[in-house]
Amino acid sequence: MVQRKVRVFDKEYSCSHYKWYTIKDLSSRTDDFARDCLDLFGYFSKLFTDHPDENNTRVYILHYDEEKRPDLLWTCSHFEHNTSIDITALAYFLALLEKYFGATAFLDLIDDFTERLIIWVPGIEID
């Protein structure tokens, strides 16, 4: 299942190199990036209490080349939140991503049929 998702991801986002982490993966790390992601997941799970969890929420770091700062994708593969109240909460979460990573956050995909969410944050500041 994970390999299939990675192949689909490869087709959707072309970049030279990427790493992905579940929130569960990041919970064992102590670096600033992992702490920031865990803080953000705390907000994410409080704002959207129904289905996002530490296994279906992933963070992708996309590396294009040495000169360009990496992009971040915040994804959730079980996201059923698309009411007007949810969209307001999502806008708040986008603002939090911008604050934490110093770059503009974009809502790339919200699909109630497939229950997918993708947020794109290009050119993040990461140590």
Image: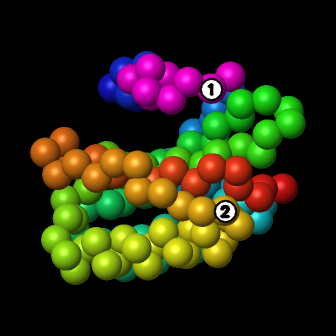
Mark 1 Cα within 10 Å, few/some/many (few <14, many 20+)? Answer: few
Would you name the residue on which mark 2 appears?
103
Identity of the residue drawn at 28% across and 72% down: 87
* Any part of residue 106 in sight: yes
* Any part of residue 49 in sight: no
Q: Secondary structure at mark 2?
A: loop
Is residue 14 or residue 57 the one in the foreground? 14
Precedes in sequence: disc 2 or disc 1: 1
> Residue 43 in the image: x percent, y percent?
46, 77
Instruction: Indicate the quadrant where residue 14 lies.
Output: top right
Return the mark for residue 127.
none
Would you name the residue on which mark 1 appears?
15
Tell me: 116 left or right of 35. left
Instruction: Indicate the quadrant where residue 44 lies.
Output: bottom left
Write down the region rendered in magenta. Answer: 8-16
- Relative to residue 63, is residue 102 depicted above or below? below
Identity of the residue drawn at 60% across and 62% down: 104
- Relative to residue 118, is residue 92 depicted above or below? below
Identity of the residue drawn at 45% across and 73% down: 93
Tell me: 18 left or right of 90. right
Is residue 23 or residue 47 the one in the foreground? 47
Discs 2, 1 touching: Cβ within 8 Å: no
Tell me: 54 left or right of 95. left
> Residue 47 in the image: x percent, y percent?
34, 78
Mark 2 Cα within 10 Å, few/some/many (few <14, many 20+)? Answer: some
Identity of the residue drawn at 71% across and 34% down: 63
Which amino acid does the dot numbered 1 rest on?
Cys
